[in-house]
Image (tube, helix red, strand yellow):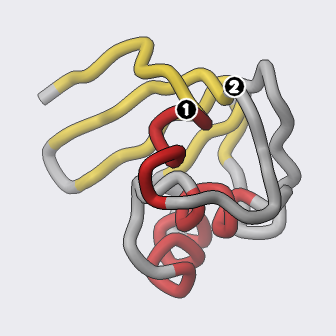
Amino acid sequence: MRVDKFLKNARLIKRRTVAKQAADGGRIDVNGRTAKAGTEVAAGDTMKIAFGNKTLEIEILAVPETVRKEQAQEMYRVIGEEE
């Protein structure tokens, strides 16, 4: 699944266009490498997302094509958070 779609489905970023801008701006790393919006992610990958003054590191647990709001947090596990 593409990075921008994963971030939107996991409810980490509200809109896919905003997720695409974040990825293309170099604020997202997947497995230690800067990711573009089209970078594919899979279960077991780690991702760092820079939100302004906060950085979130997660482990991807699942990548379902469709997901309900209640199930979104089951797609990832937070590894670390920095301010």
Would you say 13 lies left or right of 63 here? left
Amino acid type at mark 1: Glu
Amino acid type at mark 2: Leu
Would you say 70 lies left or right of 36 here? left
Give the mark, 1 or 2, whose residue is nearer the N terminus: 2
Is there a contact, CB below 8 Å, between mark 1 and mark 2?
Answer: yes
Classify mark 1: residues with Cα within 10 Å, few (<14), some (14-19) or many (20+).
few
Figure check: 74 above or below 19: above
Circle 2: element type? loop
Marks 1 and 2, how far apart in space? 7 Å
* Residue 83 percent coordinates (x, y): 12, 29
Q: Residue at x 43, y 13 (%)?
A: 79
Residue named by callout 2: 61
Figure check: 75 above or below 81: below
Q: Which residue is drawn at 55% across and 79% down?
A: 16
Could you tell me which quadrant the N terminus lies in? Answer: bottom right
Q: Report the disc number at residue 74.
A: 1
Q: Which residue is drawn at 50% across and 21% down?
A: 77
Q: In which quarter of the image is residue 4?
A: bottom right
* Residue 49 percent coordinates (x, y): 44, 43
- Nearest the eye: 56 or 24: 56
Classify mark 2: residues with Cα within 10 Å, few (<14), some (14-19) or many (20+).
some
- Nearest the eye: 66 or 41: 66
- Nearest the eye: 28 or 14: 14
